[in-house]
Image (cartoon, rainbow, N blue to C red):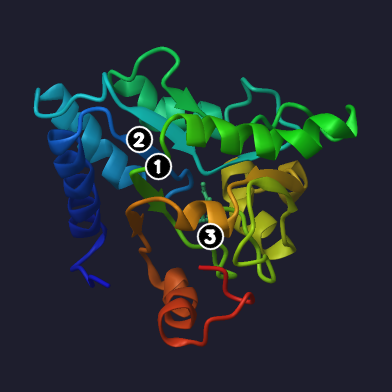
Amino acid sequence: MVITSGPDEAADIAAGAVERLLASNPDAVLGLATGSSPVPTYRLLIERHRSGRLSFARSRAFLLDEYVGLPADHAESYRAFIDREFTGQVDFGPEAVDGPDGTVGLDRAGDDLATAGQTYEEQISRAGGIDLQLLGIGGDGHIGFNEPVSSLGSRTRLKTLTEETRADNARFFGGDIDAVPRHVITQGIGTILEARHLVMIATGESKAGPIARAVEGPLTAMVPA
Ligand code: F6R
């Protein structure tokens, strides 16, 4: 664990890890988290790309998770979020960024949702697995959207968000908890643990409790992170 003087230094360390990886392997596969924690890291990566220090042209990226039931072009879908905050501002190739398909919606054939996780796992494995996965941590200790009691060996699948997570994320939906989807497709904890390097970023006082439970508490499915 690295305790930094603030979010800027944390972002610098995380961006440095991505930069070193791409310098040694330009074809590296990145795992990207959304939410607010990695945004300063993405800003640094965009700056370093613009200054010619860093290229993503040969790399690929996989999102950690996606809301279910939002139209793909909804501003808060994680595909739209990552495009706006990071991938659309650097030089990833046109097909280089993937996320779980959350547009299948709960009212369409169950098969779509049941197989969306497996399909995504296959895409990640065809790409050779994830070299570096960026992560945040939820107020309830979630990682990806693996909420408390998620199996530590879980794979990409449909999950239901806790009320705490929906309340936390209402800030992205104009403060309206009812606008926050109830369901998501998320990489499982087992999937995340297969990445070759994990970098979790936690900033701000609200993360002190979950970080203490994750780092100092017992290994338990109640604290997926
Ligand atoms: C996002 C994700 C979540 C967030 C977590 C923290 O892709 O999987 O686990 O990392 O909810 O969110 P922020 O960073 O907004 O506090």
Q: Identify the residue shown where x is 63% and y is 25%.
A: 74
Front residue of 169 and 63: 63
Residue 103: image quadrant is top right
Front residue of 205 and 103: 103
Q: Secondary structure at mark 2?
A: strand
Horizontal relation, residue 170 to residue 131: left or right: right
Q: Which mark is residue 29?
A: 2
Beta carbon at label 3 within 8 Å of ligand 1: yes
**CB-based contact (under 8 Å), mark 2 and mark 1:** yes
Q: Which of disc 1 and disc 2 is earlier in sequence? A: 2
Residue 171 on image: x %, y %: 58, 49
Q: Residues within 10 Å of mark 3 (few under 14, many from 20)?
A: many
Q: Identify the residue shown where x is 33% and y is 44%.
A: 131
Q: Which mark is residue 155?
A: none
- At label 3, the amino acid type is Ile
Q: Which residue is identified by label 1?
A: 130
Q: Nearer the viewer, mark 1 or mark 3?
A: 1
- At label 1, the amino acid type is Ile
Q: Residues within 10 Å of mark 2 (few under 14, many from 20)?
A: many
Is 205 situated above or below 173? below
3D distance between C-alphas at marks 2 and 1 = 5 Å
Q: Which mark is residue 143?
A: 3
Residue 111 on image: x %, y %: 85, 32
Q: Nearer the viewer, mark 3 or mark 2?
A: 2
3D distance between C-alphas at marks 1 and 3 = 16 Å
Q: Which of disc 2 and disc 3 is earlier in sequence? A: 2
Quadrant where the image shows the N terminus: bottom left
Residue 181: image quadrant is top right
Horizontal relation, residue 202 to residue 106: left or right: left
Q: Residues within 10 Å of mark 1 (few under 14, many from 20)?
A: many
